[in-house]
Image (spheres, grey):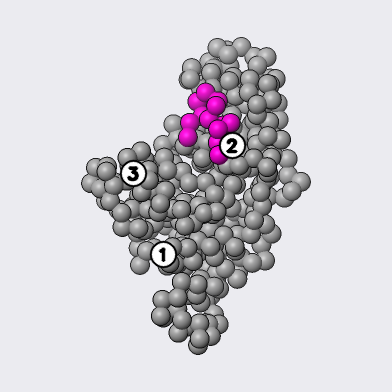
Amino acid sequence: SRAPRRSPGTISRRPSLQRSGLLWCIMASMATRSRSLSTPRPRPTPVNTETPAAKKRRAQGADDVLDPRCEELIASLASMPPVGRAKRFRLSDAVRHVALADGRRLEKVVINCGAPTLYSNVEDTEDVDTFRSLCRIVVGQQLAGAAAKTIWARFVTSLGGDASLITPEAVLASDMEALRSSAGLSNAKARSIFDLAAHYERGDLSDAVLLDPSLSAAELYAKLTAVKGIGPWSAHMYQMFGLLQPDIFPTGDLGVRNGIKEAFGLRGAGKNGALDEKRDKEKLEAAMAPFAPYRSLAAWYMWRCADTPSFLE
């Protein structure tokens, strides 16, 4: 049966995300993030400022003229500070690009979903501990949010009782089996955390590396997936929600693929026409190509379409 409607200002707990608890882990790691910015914004009251000429051009199918309701939404975001971490950008620019791209295909989705909650502004001075955030991701893999929170608390206790004590040095100085047992980790997760710590000790990973604006998304992805236990989906989720990178397309996420199927009317090679991550790779990439360099935002809207197909109407 179809999932119940949810308000446009919330991110639902789809099975594709709930199955691992990673989204909870990533968002929980941003402890200094402003609560006010994560609170859903009220939908702006549309003000029809469209000129007669613009209205005529839009009625004639002009691809560069947006619906006044969409323009009003974008205007409400214009005063926000730039978002992102290493590479910062304006959310209003990203929303405009997504709404206009591919012949305004997602314009109605943008209007019906309202302001995206994918990003919250992070101050330039904020201290971001990438090692601790990645440990949280590994701990929370294949766990629902509550279970991930419990295991994380045990992990923190095992390393001294304070999250600030979770460092590569502290992990490598501990006994793997003792840490695994006391925290309730699987063997695979324990090995992954120790391998992650080793990457930091060697300098392959660090706050400076992961927040380096000169590195491309592909280069960061390669560095993350070099760690045992951090696969493509985990890396993409961290890039999107941890590093707030604007142009990530998580083809491995079922919710994104289902949203593309709804929004683009595509049929794939999977069961009942589902889009398959591997067999339909070219089709998926072609569909999302026009939304670069803001495919992270387009993916967020695909999640919303998968949850509530009426957003397309």
Q: Residues within 10 Å of mark 2 (few under 14, many from 20)?
A: few
Tell me where residue 7 sits by quadrant. bottom left
Residue 300 appears left or right of 260: right
Q: Position of residue 191 (x, y in %)?
A: 53, 18
How many marks are shown on the rendered structure? Answer: 3
According to the picture, the residue beneath numbered tag 3 turns out to be: 280
Q: Nearer the viewer, mark 1 or mark 2?
A: 2
**Which circle's residue, 2 or 3, is located before the other in the chain?**
2
Residue 236 appears left or right of 127: left
According to the picture, the residue beneath numbered tag 1 turns out to be: 105
In the structure shown, which secondary structural element does the residue marked by tag 1 occupy? Answer: loop
> For the view shown, which residue lies furthest in the right direction?
125
**Which circle's residue, 1 or 2, is located before the other in the chain?**
1
The one nearer the camera, 120 or 265, is 265
According to the picture, the residue beneath numbered tag 2 turns out to be: 219
> For the view shown, which residue lies furthest in the bottom direction?
52
Determine contact: label 2, label 3, CB under 8 Å.
Answer: no
